[in-house]
C-alpha cells in the first residue's frame, strides 16, 4: 500500500513538470482570471451596452425556451431551423446586431446557429453570448 | 511495451502490490496476456483523452467550468494539470511501470469524473462531455456514464488482476 501511494505521488509529481512547462508557455495568452472569449463571442456587459440594437436569438431546445428566456428573444434552434428561420428574418433588419445564446459557457448550439446565420443566411454582425443563458441568470442575481 | 514483457515474466512480486488473486496463486496463462492487453488498452484510452485536453487546455477549462463546482481561476489551473496526470498515469499503465500507482490515480480520477457528472446532472446542468474532445461532443448523459463506468470497471479489474510487477517496481 505504501508503495502504491509512493508511486502515485511520483506520477503526480511527474505530471506537474509538463503542466508547468505548458502553463509557462501560455502564461501571457491563457485566461487565468476569467473565461476567454472564443471567436465571435461577446460578454453580457458589451451586449447590454448595445441596448435596443440587439436581437436575442435563443438556440436552446423548444422546451427550455418555453420555460424561460431573455426578454424578447426569438427561438431559432437546429431542430426546427427551416420553420423558425423565416420568423426570425421577419424581425431582423440590417442595422441590428444578432446575439445567439444557449445554456452554458461550453454548449455548442449557439456557435452552430451563429455559424449557420452567417454562412447560410449571409447575415452580418452575428455574435454569441459568452456564458449563455447561465451568464444572463447570474447577472440577474447580482 | 515493457508492461507486456513484464506480464509474461516469471513471478517475482513484492507482497505489498499483490492482489488477492495473485496471492492465492490463481494466476493463469491467459491472464498473463489478457491483463497486459487490457492495461495497454486502458492506458492508451487515458493517454488519448489526456492528449486531447492538453492540446486545448482553455477548452477543457470551459468544460470544467460547466460543472459549476470550481471557480474559473481554479478550474483553468486544473485544466493545465489534469490532462498531464491522465497522460503520465496512462503511459505508466501502458508500459507497465509503477502500475499500482497508475491504477490508483486513474481509478480516483474516474470516480471523481463520475461524481462530478452525477452531481451536475442532479443540479439540472446540461453537460457537454469534455472527456474525449470533439468525439464526445454529442454524447448523452447515459453514454457519458456508460463510458466512465466501463473505464472504472476495467481499472478495478486490473487492480484485482494486477500481474507480477517488474523488478523496477520492486525497487520503488
Image (cartoon, rainbow, N blue to C red):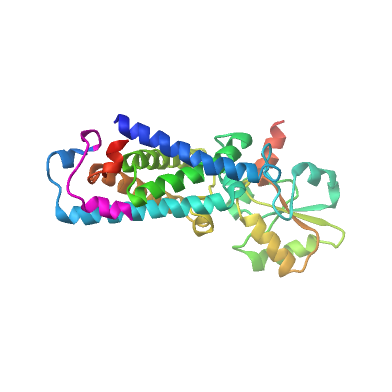
Return the x and y of residue A8 as percentages of the image width and height.
Answer: 39, 36
Residue B54 magenta-drawn? no
Q: Is residue A114 left or right of residue B66?
A: right
Q: Is residue B45 left or right of residue A76?
A: left
Q: Quadrant of the C terminus of chain B?
A: top left
Q: Quadrant of the N terminus of chain B?
A: bottom left
Count of numbered circles on the image:
0
Residue at the location (71% across, 43% down)? A28
Q: Is residue B25 left or right of residue A37?
A: left
- Is B167 or B129 nearer to us in this picture? B167
**Magenta stretch?**
B1-17
Q: Is residue A13 left or right of residue A79?
A: left
Q: Quadrant of residue A137?
A: top right
Residue at the location (31% across, 51% down)? B39
Return the x and y of residue B12 as percentages of the image width and height.
Answer: 19, 42
- Is A13 or A97 nearer to us in this picture? A13
Question: Above or below — where is B71 with respect to A113?
Answer: above
Residue A109 seen: yes
Residue B140 seen: no
Amino acid at each position: 500500500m505504501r508503495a502504491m501511494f509512493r508511486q502515485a505521488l511520483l506520477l503526480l509529481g511527474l505530471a506537474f513538470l509538463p503542466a508547468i512547462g505548458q502553463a509557462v508557455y501560455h502564461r501571457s495568452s491563457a485566461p487565468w482570471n476569467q473565461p476567454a472569449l472564443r471567436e465571435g463571442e461577446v460578454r453580457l456587459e458589451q451586449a447590454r451596452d448595445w441596448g435596443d440594437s440587439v436581437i436575442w436569438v435563443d438556440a436552446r431546445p423548444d422546451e427550455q425556451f418555453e420555460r424561460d428566456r431573455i426578454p424578447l428573444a426569438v427561438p431559432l434552434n437546429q431542430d426546427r431551423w427551416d420553420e423558425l428561420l423565416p420568423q426570425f428574418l421577419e424581425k431582423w433588419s440590417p442595422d441590428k446586431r444578432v446575439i445567439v445564446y444557449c445554456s452554458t459557457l461550453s454548449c455548442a448550439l449557439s456557435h452552430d446557429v451563429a455559424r449557420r446565420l452567417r454562412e447560410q443566411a449571409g447575415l452580418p454582425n452575428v455574435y454569441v453570448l459568452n456564458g449563455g443563458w447561465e451568464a444572463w441568470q447570474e447577472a440577474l442575481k447580482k | 511495451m515493457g508492461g507486456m514483457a513484464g506480464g509474461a515474466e516469471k513471478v517475482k512480486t513484492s507482497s505489498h502490490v499483490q492482489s488477492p488473486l495473485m496471492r492465492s496463486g490463481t494466476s493463469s496463462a491467459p491472464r498473463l496476456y489478457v491483463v497486459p492487453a487490457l492495461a495497454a488498452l486502458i492506458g492508451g484510452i487515458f493517454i488519448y483523452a489526456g492528449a486531447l485536453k492538453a492540446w486545448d487546455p482553455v477548452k477543457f477549462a470551459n468544460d470544467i467550468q460547466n460543472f459549476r463546482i470550481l471557480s474559473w481561476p481554479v478550474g483553468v489551473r486544473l485544466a493545465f494539470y489534469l490532462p498531464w496526470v491522465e497522460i503520465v498515469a496512462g503511459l505508466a499503465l501502458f508500459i507497465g511501470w509503477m502500475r499500482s500507482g497508475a491504477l490508483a490515480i486513474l481509478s480516483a480520477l474516474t470516480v471523481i469524473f463520475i461524481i462530478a457528472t452525477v452531481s451536475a446532472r442532479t443540479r439540472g446542468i446540461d453537460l457537454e462531455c469534455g472527456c474525449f474532445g470533439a468525439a464526445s461532443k454529442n454524447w448523452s448523459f447515459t453514454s457519458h456514464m456508460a463510458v466512465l463506468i466501463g473505464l472504472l470497471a476495467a481499472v478495478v479489474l486490473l487492480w484485482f488482476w494486477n500481474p507480477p510487477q517488474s523488478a523496477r517496481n520492486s525497487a520503488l
